[in-house]
Amino acid sequence: MIIVGDIGNTETKICLIDSNKNVIKKINLDTKKITNLLIKKSLSNLRLKNMKIKKCLFCSVVPKSFNMIKRSLIKDYKIKSYELKSLNLHKLINIKVNYKQIGSDRLANALGIMNNKDNFIILDFGTATTFDVLIKNTYRGGVIAPGVKISLSTLSDKATLIPNINLKKTKKIIGLNTINAVRSGFFWGYAGLIDNIINLIKKETKKSFKIILTGGLSDLFKNSIKTKVVLNKDITIKGLIKAINLIK
């Protein structure tokens, strides 16, 4: 058995993986609500006491949360945890960016989809909307745009007359009320942003790409942009499973 986890700004996932690389148990936590007590209770749901856990690996963009989980695993279960960027990832992938400034979640995504023959743009709808460029086995960098949900929440917070709105696909561009107008602006605005950035990446690199969508709102946009895409919400965990063999 191994443990892998993805600690994002919004959500934290901790997965128990069997020898066939299948997820057999998973817990999801609100990252902002993580406390030592919550971690203790949540980890107990994995029933780790009588299991032989060989390795444990996380990708984390929230060091405080990772450190709390790391301490709990070693204290309560004698399980030593590693963070993805502490490993020698250059054995698996060429990284042509400032290593200190790239999020380990984005590297995990790249590892999860890389096949050494195809080029990929990985579009992740997280707290930020990120585009990561993978040319065969080389991570070439990417683009970070504002996240859809956080942008929508900010608009509602700053504009008194705009209520909290759940984003939905709209058929009509012109909204006949405030809610529909905002939904149209965000939905079609982000659809246009996605298509434009993908086209600019293609133009700059002079290469063709397979487009992978992942993250919370990927379902919403998968059929609404001009570019052909593939939806895959498991690439982060798959990337961690690939990298865990680097732990000695």
Image: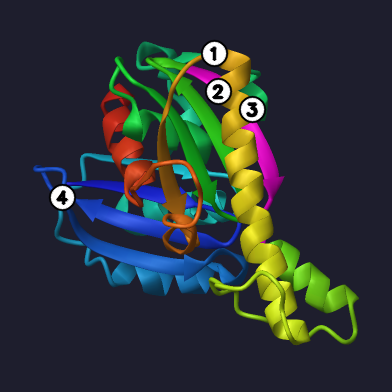
Q: Which mark is residue 22?
A: 4
Q: Which mark is residue 200?
A: 3
User: What's the amino acid at mark 2?
Assistant: Lys
Q: Which mark is residue 202?
A: 2
Corner quadrant of residue 91:
top left
Separation of marks 3 and 2 at Cα, in angstroms: 5 Å
Query: Residue lying furthest left in this view?
Result: 20
Q: Between disc 4 and disc 1, whose residue precedes?
A: 4
Figure check: 106 above or below 7: above
On whether residue 163 falls in the magenta region, the answer is no
Separation of marks 1 and 3 at Cα, in angstroms: 10 Å
In the structure shown, which secondary structural element does the residue marked by tag 1 occupy?
Answer: loop
In the structure shown, which secondary structural element does the residue marked by tag 3 occupy?
Answer: helix
Q: Nearer the viewer, mark 4 or mark 1?
A: 1
Residue 122, x across and y down, in percent:
47, 37
Visible in this render: residue 214?
A: yes
Q: Nearer the viewer, mark 2 or mark 4?
A: 2
Q: Which mark is residue 206?
A: 1
Figure check: 106 above or below 214: above
Query: What is the span of residues highlighted in magenta in the rendered image?
Result: 139-148
Give left or right: position of 6 versus 50.
Answer: right
Visible in this render: residue 80?
A: no
CB of mark 3 within 8 Å of CB of mark 2?
yes
CB of mark 2 within 8 Å of CB of mark 1?
yes
Chief secondary structure of the magenta portion: strand
Separation of marks 2 and 1 at Cα, in angstroms: 5 Å
